[in-house]
Image (cartoon, helix red, strand yellow):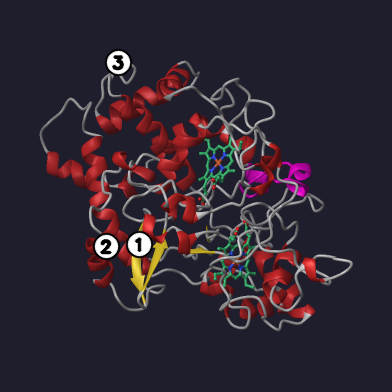
């Protein structure tokens, strides 16, 4: 990302601290309110950007309110256009790859290929032989991630928000992290590989749903002819926002899991699920980072607080990135995913926090974490997909600091008599996981609870 493009990059660290100090107190509880305050300037900036091609000049003040991000992402026309974009496999070079290729609804909007998940867990781009370094997270519930920001909690600077495992889709450009995110796969040479923004716009204008593009530009932005609009930021911006709007729609952010119905009093949990729910909140400490309560504004729980942590997860030795061409991965098999630290290094005003953020990844939502098209379909977990089942990852949380490292035992069997070395041994969270003293039954109960988080639950008749 080019920091110069960031409309609201803060010029001084002092400013950030002051901003953060305004909101001292219980961070996790009052999160959303704070986000709204941080979001406001971003929304205003993006509204200004989006007035460039508009014909009408009057009623500017009203438009500022009308074009607020919430309003846009809830716009049904924009959502419908975004849905077309999401599933369009012509939007790659060569054609053949859509967003859905790596984010299948049947797999909870994450990697839809069981064989890939079972091994490297990383998906091939439109160009054969090109892989990125990470596992596709779910594209659902990502629209709720606040614009990337930092705040002070108990004297420590805490990074929050953004999209991608490392937060580099900040939301600084379009006012929403998922909207910024949605522009990137098209241009990424290891993903959809389209040469530039102009080419993406051209492909969309040539699609069989281009009428939607025209209509939205006219209805929402008052642009007579989007194909004649000479502002490429505008043309490409609408595409990013439309994808985010689709991701924000009921089709993606469905909130139809068993747990949602339980919260609404429509179904009971089994005794095991109920026990898991209690462990998830209390003994297992899961809800510390994957909050499970309805938010203050009534939004159902998102199972992420959008903060960053290094859990000390092992590297995934099957990751095809390790053997990628040196022009993509100059470090070869020595590569270690720097996560948030790698991103912060590129931001002059946050670079001083890069070292202490190495190996941290954004807390993913646990909604749909078990959603799979068939019982034997394998899903992978963690930023590199090292874990292949919920049982394994819960066992890791429980015993990371109890079992010895693989190098310390003769016959290493990960998860049984050891755990492999962490991918990055710095900045590991030693407070909230590692030795939870859960019994086998308790681990199973937590897994059973996570299985209640899959959307599309059908309520029993009666
Ligand atoms: C080749 C596979 C691939 C394709 C195609 C792809 N993605 Fe992704 N997606 C990924 C990977 C891998 C990540 C994580 C990358 C990272 O963190 O660096 C990701 C991350 C995301 C996220 C971030 C979720 C979060 O919570 O931070 C969203 C949202 C998303 N993709 C949506 C999309 C959209 C929209 C498209 C189409 C424009 C798309 N993806 C195309 C693989 C893919
Ligand atoms: C300190 C914060 C924290 C706590 C506590 C925590 N998690 Fe996580 N969780 C994370 C982060 C960060 C990741 C991503 C780490 C990575 O990929 O390197 C993650 C990833 C996961 C994933 C993988 C999801 C995916 O889509 O890949 C699962 C499943 C999970 N956590 C379940 C749990 C459970 C169950 C507990 C309680 C036993 C728990 N977490 C406690 C922060 C936390």
In the image, residue 178 lies at what x, y percent?
44, 46
Q: Which residues are magenta?
A: 104-121
Looking at the rendered image, the quarter that the C terminus falls into is bottom right
Task: Give residue 64's position: percent from left, percent from top.
Answer: 19, 44
Q: Residue furthest right?
A: 411
Residue 300, how many percent across, how many down? 48, 64
Q: Are marks 1 and 2 in contact (CB under 8 Å)?
A: yes
Q: Is residue 268 above or below residue 355?
A: below
Q: Quadrant of the N terminus?
A: top left
- Along the polypeptide, which appears first: circle 3 or circle 2? 2
Closer to viewer: mark 3 or mark 1: 1
Instruction: Report the residue marked by disc 1.
Output: 150
Please name the residue that numbered disc 3 is placed on: 228
In the rendered image, the vertical position of residue 86 relative to residue 266, given as above or below: above
Q: How many marks?
A: 3
Q: CA distance from mark 1 to mark 2?
A: 7 Å
Rendering quarter of residue 131: top right
Label 3 residue SS = loop
Instruction: Assess whether residue 114 is covered by the magenta stretch.
Output: yes
Q: Residue at x 70, y 65 (%)?
A: 393
- What is the secondary structure assignment of the residue under circle 1? strand
């Amino acid at each position: 990302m080019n920091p110069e493009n960031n409309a609201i990059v803060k010029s001084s660290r002092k400013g950030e601290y002051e901003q953060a100090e305004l909101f001292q107190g219980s961070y996790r509880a009052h999160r959303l309110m704070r986000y709204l305050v941080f979001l406001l300037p971003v929304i205003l900036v993006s509204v200004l950007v989006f007035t460039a091609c508009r014909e009408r000049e009057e009623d500017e003040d009203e438009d500022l309110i009308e074009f607020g991000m919430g309003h846009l992402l809830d716009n049904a026309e924009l959502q419908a256009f975004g849905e077309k974009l999401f599933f369009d496999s012509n939007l790659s070079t060569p054609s053949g790859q859509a967003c859905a290729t790596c984010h299948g609804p049947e797999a909870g909007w994450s990697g839809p290929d069981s064989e890939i998940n079972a091994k490297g867990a990383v998906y091939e781009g439109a160009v054969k032989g090109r892989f990125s370094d990470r596992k596709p997270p779910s594209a659902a519930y990502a629209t709720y991630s606040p614009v990337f920001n930092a705040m002070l909690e108990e004297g420590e600077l805490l990074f929050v928000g953004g999209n991608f495992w490392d937060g580099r889709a900040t939301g600084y450009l379009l006012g929403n992290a998922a909207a910024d995110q949605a522009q990137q796969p098209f241009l990424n040479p290891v993903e959809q590989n389209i040469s530039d923004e102009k080419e993406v716009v051209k492909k969309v204008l040539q699609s069989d749903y281009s009428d939607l593009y025209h209509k939205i530009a006219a209805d929402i932005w008052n642009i007579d002819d989007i194909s004649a609009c000479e502002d490429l930021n505008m043309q490409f911006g609408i595409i990013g926002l439309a994808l985010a709007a689709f991701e924000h729609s009921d089709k993606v952010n469905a909130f139809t899991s068993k747990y949602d119905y339980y919260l609404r009093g429509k179904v009971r949990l089994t005794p095991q699920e109920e026990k898991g729910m209690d462990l998830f909140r209390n003994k297992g400490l899961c809800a510390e980072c994957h909050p499970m309560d309805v938010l203050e504004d009534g939004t159902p729980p998102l199972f992420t607080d959008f903060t960053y942590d290094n859990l000390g997860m092992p590297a995934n030795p099957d990751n095809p990135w390790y053997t990628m061409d040196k022009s993509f991965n100059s470090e070869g098999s020595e590569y270690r995913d720097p996560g948030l630290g790698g991103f912060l290094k590129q931001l002059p005003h946050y670079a001083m926090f890069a070292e202490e953020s190495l190996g941290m990844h954004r807390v993913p939502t646990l909604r749909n974490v078990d959603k799979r098209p068939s019982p034997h379909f394998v899903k992978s977990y963690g930023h590199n997909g090292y874990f292949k089942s919920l049982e394994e990852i819960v066992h890791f949380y429980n015993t990371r600091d109890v079992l010895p490292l693989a190098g310390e035992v003769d016959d290493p069997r990960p998860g049984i008599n050891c755990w492999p070395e962490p991918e990055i041994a710095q900045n590991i969270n030693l407070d909230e996981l590692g030795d939870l003293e859960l019994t086998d039954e308790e681990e199973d109960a937590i897994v059973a609870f996570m299985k209640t988080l899959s959307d599309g639950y059908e309520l029993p008749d009666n």
